[in-house]
Image (tube, rainbow, N blue to C red):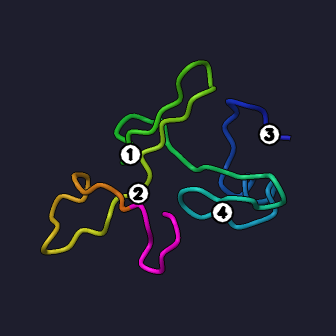
Amino acid sequence: MIQPGGVISYLEMCTEEGVNLQRGMNYHLRGDISVILMSLRRNAPYADRIEENGRVLIYEGHDVPKTPDNLVPKIVDQPMYNPGGSLT
């Protein structure tokens, strides 16, 4: 069992959960189990953080792709809906 605050490898994490985890949020992997991948290291690409003794997660999410029309992806707010109409 993975302990809170423990450091494990990607392979150990995937083995524990029984799936190949990809970036971001992985919902309902096995029933009620969800895994959120984030980095708290200095210079991490996202400003994710944990507050209130682990009770609050501030998760920046992901950036839109960088394009010639959008050179600074961090300033674009995530839309509420995907192109197919589902919530992001």
Q: Name the residue under label 4.
A: 21
Q: Residue at x 34, y 39 (%)?
A: 43
Q: Which mark is residue 2?
A: 3
- Sequence-wise, the earlier of marks 4 and 3 is 3
Q: Position of residue 30 (x, y in %)?
A: 83, 60
Q: Is residue 83 magenta?
A: yes
Q: Residue at x 79, y 39 (%)?
A: 2
Residue with the mark numbered 2: 62
SS for callout 1 = loop
Mark 2 vs mark 3, CA separation in Å: 26 Å
Q: What stretch is highlighted in magenta?
A: 80-88
Which circle marks residue 46 in the picture?
Answer: 1
Proximity of marks 4 and 1: CB atoms separated by less than 8 Å: no
Q: What element carries label 2?
A: loop
Estimate how packed mark 4 is, as few (under 14), some (14 to 19) or many (20 or more) residues with alpha carbons within 10 Å. some
Dot 4 amino acid type: Leu
Tell me whether circle 2 and circle 1 mark residues in contact (CB < 8 Å).
yes
Q: Residue, x 21% and y 52% (percent of image)?
A: 75
Label 3 environment density (alpha carbons within 10 Å; few <14, some 14–19, many ≥20)? few
- Marks 2 and 1: which is nearer the front? 2
Direction from residue 85 to residue 54 in the image, left or right: right
Q: Given this view, does label 2 or label 3 mark the residue nearer the observer? A: 2
In the visual, does 40 lie left or right of 25? Answer: left
Amino acid at circle 3: Ile
* Residue 71 in the figure: left or right of residue 85: left
Is residue 88 positioned above or below 9 on the image? below
Element at label 3: loop
Single out the mark in the foreground, 1 or 3.
Answer: 1
* Position of residue 76 measured from the top left corner of the image (x, y, whole percent): 25, 57
Earlier in the chain: of badge 2 and badge 4, it is 4
